[in-house]
Amino acid sequence: MPISRSRIGSPEVAAVFAGWPEPIRERALELRALIVEVAASIPEVGALEEALRWGEPSYLTSQSRSGTTIRIGWKAASPSQYCLLFHCQTSLAESFRDQYRHELRFAGNRAIVLDEHQDLPRAALRECIAAALTYHLTRGRR
């Protein structure tokens, strides 16, 4: 899927990223690029839509409806951390926790917690992102 088919780069989302501290913004944009890259590698996902949901940059499979929404979050209360968030009513975070408990940090039933001082754990995140983007396609096979 060429990125041009996706609706990435909304001014509202750009404004949210611009309001985050520089080190977090850089890491969050790296995470965003990984989400777009993973989506582009899975033909069933189709065009990816970027929008704000709950005030956070969010990535949706609106066209194909193949997956569940993925969000990137940051809160001033934890200034050096940012999160990759999944819908709390899915089994995704629980499944990721079982599989990646030694590689990733989790918060509750919906978030992977990342630190601005650490490199992205790309391999693990790639698999988590792919699972979220295809959640509705593979849910019956679990």
Image: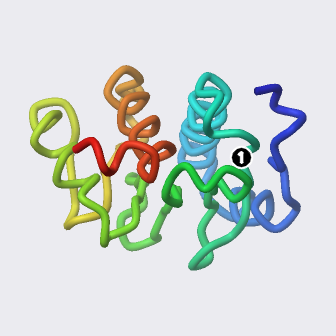
The picture quadrant where one finds residue 137 is: top left
Packing grade of label 1 (10 A; few <14, some 14-19, many >=20) is many
Q: Is residue 2 left or right of residue 116?
A: right
Depth check, front residue: 6 or 74: 6
| Secondary structure of the residue carrying numbered label 1 | loop
Q: Is residue 111 left or right of residue 100?
A: right
Residue at image location 37% in from the left, 30% down from the top: 127
- Give the position of the C terminus as an image quadrant: top left
Residue at image location 40% in from the left, 59% down from the top: 86
Depth check, front residue: 8 or 12: 8
The picture quadrant where one finds residue 44 is: top right
Q: Position of residue 76 (x, y in %)?
A: 46, 71
Q: Is residue 22 above or below residue 18?
A: above
Q: Amino acid at mark 1?
A: Leu
Q: Which residue is mark 1?
A: 48
Q: Is residue 43 above or below residue 113?
A: above
Residue at image location 45% in from the left, 35% down from the top: 130
Q: Position of residue 46 (x, y in %)?
A: 71, 39
Q: Is residue 4 above or below residue 83?
A: above
Residue at image location 41% in from the left, 54% down from the top: 83
